[in-house]
Image (cartoon, coloured by chain):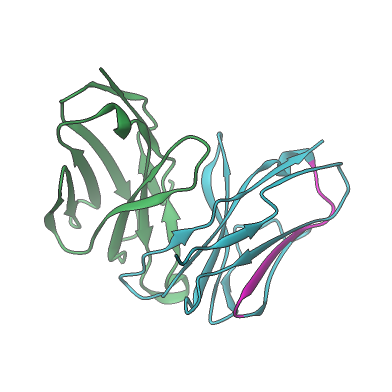
Chain colours: A green, B cyan
């Protein structure tokens, strides 16, 4: 089992729709969770971080965390063609010998079509 | 504008040659990561350091890869001898560490081994 799992997609949504991206992780000791966006040929850039159960909103982005289910999601409202990219889920291990280790999922390719 | 600097940006080399990639983390960051990205494997953690000490290099093929931080402003990743399967993008990232550890990526070193 991979430490961080995402559906690779591609996920295709029409412009203006809500895009929903999901991620599960295996280490129950993980405490910090991040979503990165990566455009083709570019490096990943941070778009959201979340540390507590529940929702966190930032503009059109909402991150959701459920530690009991070991599940993280990202919702993108009013999707725009410029949101088309690969979205990477990242999990920070906080305990033991893996303290500070940041592990990424495979990434989900999102395409927003006009 | 603080950023992680990586060299070289692009490298084409012949199989069997030594390759050295360099990274200058953001000033003050005490955690440095080396990742490798391919289409098949996604973003894999090769090694990471805190305060220049290696914490985990289990993701790195030990027989040919080595990672070091000779000082706080320089991290190196060396491959000797290189093989075609090492062709990938190698990213360096740095951060302050801790549970809220936001890491910032360099632009990557695009390696092709022929």
Where residue A108 appears, x then y in whole percent? 37, 35
Where residue A34 appears, x then y in whole percent? 31, 55
Q: Nearer the viewer, residue A58 or B49?
A: A58
Q: Is residue B76 magenta?
A: yes
Q: Nearer the viewer, residue B26 or B53?
A: B26
Left or right position of A43 against B100:
right
Left or right position of A67 against B47:
left
Where residue A11 appears, x then y in whole percent? 31, 25
Q: Residue furthest left?
A: A54
Q: Which residues are magenta?
A: B72-83
Choose top left, top right, bottom left or bottom right for residue A38. top left
Q: Residue furthest top?
A: A114
Identify which residue is drawn at 15% across, 47% down.
Answer: A59
Check the image and report above or below for A18 versus B102: above
Image mark count = 0
Identify which residue is drawn at 53% across, 69% down.
Answer: B32
Check the image and report above or below for B51 versus B83: below
Choose top left, top right, bottom left or bottom right for residue A111. top left
Q: Quadrant of the C terminus of chain A?
A: top left
Identify which residue is drawn at 20% across, 57% down.
Answer: A67
Where residue B96 appears, x then y in whole percent? 41, 75
Left or right position of B103 against A41:
left
């Amino acid at each position: 089992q991979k430490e961080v799992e995402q559906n690779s997609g591609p996920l295709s949504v029409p412009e203006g729709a809500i895009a929903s991206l999901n991620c599960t992780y295996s280490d129950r000791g993980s405490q910090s969770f991040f979503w990165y966006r990566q455009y083709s040929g570019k490096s990943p850039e941070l778009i959201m971080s979340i540390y507590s159960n529940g929702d966190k909103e930032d503009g059109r982005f909402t991150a959701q965390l459920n530690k009991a289910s070991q599940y993280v999601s990202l919702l993108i409202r009013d999707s725009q063609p410029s949101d088309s990219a690969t979205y990477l889920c990242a999990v920070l291990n906080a305990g033991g010998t893996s303290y500070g280790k940041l592990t990424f999922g495979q990434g989900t390719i999102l395409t927003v079509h006009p | 504008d603080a950023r992680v600097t990586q060299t070289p940006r692009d490298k084409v080399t012949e199989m069997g040659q030594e390759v050295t990639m360099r990274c200058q983390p953001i000033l003050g960051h005490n955690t440095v990561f080396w990742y490798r990205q391919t289409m098949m494997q996604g973003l894999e953690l090769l090694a990471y350091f805190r305060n220049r000490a290696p914490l985990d290099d289990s993701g790195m093929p030990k027989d040919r890869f080595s990672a070091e931080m000779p000082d706080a402003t320089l991290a190196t990743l060396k491959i000797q001898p290189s093989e075609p399967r090492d062709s990938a993008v190698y990213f360096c990232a740095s951060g302050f560490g801790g549970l809220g550890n936001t890491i910032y990526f360099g632009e990557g070193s695009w390696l092709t081994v022929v």
